[in-house]
Amino acid sequence: MVRQKKPTHSRRVEQNNIEATRAKQNSQRKRTNLILNILIIVVSLLIIASLYVVFIATDPGTNQNDVQTASSTQKKEDANKGDQSTKKKEDKIAEKDSAAATEEQESSDPNVSKVISKDWKAVGTKQSGNHVNSYEMNSTDWDEKIQAFSEATDISAENMTIWYVGRGADPATQSVGTVSAKSTPDQAYRVYITWRDGEGWQPTKVEVLKSNDKR
């Protein structure tokens, strides 16, 4: 038998169909590769972001520093509380000692409601050399007497009215004064003070008067 050759036109059509199919396949392959590349980039970015969060944003060194700082602050606060608690205890002890050192007694003087005795300290002095018991107002010795009256009565010199200052049992070393607060002139105190060389005037006794006998 003799094979019949396909017409030229049919071969060309068949060849065109094959080439079109190949072109379509190449186009789909390129599109698939492009999608895969995009997915790879996206996944890579997500991995990088995850690593940043794990190793940088949650740096254990930073957290450790924060913990150490918080711990140090807490220790300082605890230490301050301890110091304040200790100071309060010391203040209470000092108050008890002060109260224990203060004595109140009755007096035979009908104008004295009570007599207060306490281990007061001398108020100090700016004077040197032989002491002269002075009653000249605004002299150094006078000002230091007023300071001793203030120490004994807890009345500040600025708020004090001085009704009388005179010699005590020993005129050279002792004085006595009657004072009150400016706001309560009828609530007066008779204060006894003694001179201590190098230390100044020291309160020795306070009499709380029923009425101001120097007013």
Image (cartoon, rainbow, N blue to C red):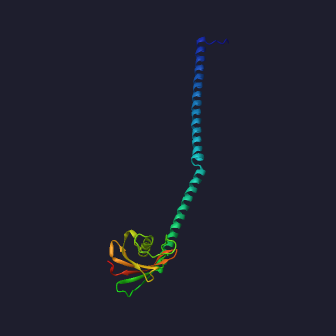
Residue at the image point whose x is 60% and y is 25% from the top? 26
Q: Is residue 36 above or below residue 103?
A: above
Q: Position of residue 106 (x, y in %)?
A: 40, 86
Identify which residue, 87 or 101, lies in the foreground.
Answer: 101
Residue 74: x and y, percent? 54, 60
Quadrant where the C terminus is found in the figure: bottom left
Q: Residue at x 50, y 67 (%)?
A: 84
Quarter of the picture containing the N terminus is: top right
Looking at the image, residue 143 lies above or below residue 62: below
Whether residue 7 can be seen here: no
User: Is 54 positioned to the left or the right of 123 in the image?
Assistant: right
In this picture, residue 62 sits left or right of residue 105: right
Residue 59 appears left or right of 163: right
Residue located at (53% from left, 67% from top):
83
Q: Is residue 62 visible?
A: yes
The x and y percentages for residue 113 are 36, 83
Residue in front for this viewpoint, 51 or 206 = 206
Name the one closer to the observer, 37 or 139: 139
